[in-house]
Image (cartoon, helix red, strand yellow):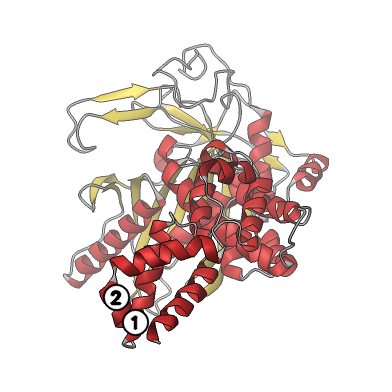
Amino acid sequence: MSYEVVIGLEVHVELLTNTKLFCSCANKFGASPNTQVCPVCLGLPGVLPVVNRKAVELLLKSALAMDCRIPEYSKFDRKNYFYPDMPKNYQISQYDNPLSVDGYLEIDSDSGKKRVRIKRIHLEEDTGKSTHLGTIDQSLYTLEDYNRAGVPLMEIVTEPDISSPQEAYDFLTTLKALLQWIRVSDCKMEEGSLRCDANVSLKKKGDEELGVKTEVKNMNSFKAVRSALAFEIERQEKAIENGERIIQETRGWEDGRGITISLRSKEYAHDYRYFPEPDLVPMKIEKSWLKELEESLPELPLARKSRLMKDYGIDEYDAGLLVSSKAAADFFEETFRQSKNLTGKQIPALQAAREISNWIKGDISKYLNAKGLEINDTALKPGQLAKMIQLISEGTISGKIGKSLVELMLEKGGDPDIIIKEKGWVQISGTNELLPYLKSVFEENPTVVKDFLDGKEKALAFLVGKVMKATAGRANPEVLNKLLKDELEKLKV
């Protein structure tokens, strides 16, 4: 490509407060339409807003976590526009004096570590939810639910530092992990608590001047953001090559069709006729409060990632996967701690850490992703995982049985020792117990036995599989392999 991609993101995050930003209506997803509303969030005449202190606190914690500067003075403004999802016909937002500015978020990109600058983080009220019958540009009618109107919304605006759709994806996954880590938002895109708009333009390589940008909306997943940006980049490049002029506009992503469509010309700040919100006084953020909030922040993901690598000897990739969820990182460390307190065979520390990490990033993550859960939403406890890993190390159960056991414990919990006895999952390690299975498999597969005796080593794997199937996966792999070879050697005589 003879062009450089320039992307800036506007990320809207609903905050974890009990009530809305300017009234006492519940901030809760899933209620029947228009049941969590009052005169304030419906914009009825004569009502006055009151700022939710918790919302301000959560924004400030986010800003501190991203190394933003917190101006001493901040205020709210009215952003004037007409759209059915905004009952007042204006949105209470922030314009020239936001709560925080000039931060950054470090991401792992294809080219290495990269800092994406944060231009500003400001607070505003969310809009209602519009449901269109049909596509957004060709709907017969639209339904409005104002339960979301007035929910505290944090908008994070980046500088145009992102250079590819994948970097945008990496930024969003890193941001999501951070915000969940510090308990600012649940970041559930399927519930609308994290939404992203993207500004994208192309410029010729080496040029200083940025190209004309388009804004892309209606992307309901991080993958959709990546796909929409890839399409829009290709669309703009083709248009430029064909001598067409790129116009500044807002485009919507049609996920089913895999295209962006024009929605409207892009507004400028002056189009919104911003002016200071007359019903709310300016805010002065006390330094003592900021210090309290900074001290209340937990160990942040990057710092924890470095510590996991140093303290447990796990590699950077595994540590990165663990800190993508605070619940997973906490579970890992608690499992390791409890593994050291088990009686019986002790696994070396480095091996224990590696085994725990492998189970969390493997079978456990697969289960969590399929169910849409965090690890602490399941019935599995750290001590149960530690005990299961010990049972595998001792040869009491096989790794294959471990897969069935961990899934059962994720769903129902329970003592691994009791479960494997009740299920008959204890591994068969005795020669006398395994020999009848071997003889049966030999009798049923004489051709394969002959193949092995004729020098075809691959036949051994087939026989191992047959015995494992016959024992329902309970045969000890090491013992079985040695016994099979010994018995097959006897047949050569």
Q: Is residue 482 visible?
A: yes
**Above or below, comparing residue 58 to residue 436 in the picture:** above
Name the residue located 23 percent from the left edge and 53 percent from the top edge.
Answer: 258
Which label was assigned to residue 297? none
Q: Is residue 99 visible?
A: no
Q: Is residue 259 left or right of residue 194?
A: left
Q: Nearer the viewer, residue 207 or 296?
A: 296
Quadrant housing residue 397: bottom right
Q: Amino acid at mark 1?
A: Phe
The residue carrying mark 2 is 448
Quadrant housing residue 2: bottom left
Q: Where in the figure is residue 446, as x and y percent of width and height? A: 28, 73
Q: In the picture, which quadrant includes the C terminus?
A: bottom left
Element at label 1: helix
Asked whether the residues under the numbered discs 1 and 2 touch, taking CB atoms below 8 Å apart as contact, a structural biologist would say yes
Name the residue located 61 percent from the left edge and 30 percent from the top edge.
Answer: 17
Q: Amino acid at mark 2?
A: Val
Q: Where in the figure is residue 442, as x and y percent of width and height? A: 34, 70
**Above or below, comparing residue 378 to residue 244 in the picture:** above
Q: Where in the figure is residue 297, as x and y percent of width and height? A: 73, 47
Q: Nearer the viewer, residue 327 or 25?
A: 327
- State the CA–CA distance, disc 1 to disc 2: 6 Å
Q: Where in the figure is residue 298, as x and y percent of width and height? A: 73, 49
Element at label 2: helix
The residue carrying mark 1 is 452
Name the residue located 48 percent from the left edge and 12 percent from the top edge.
Answer: 45
Quadrant housing residue 471: bottom left
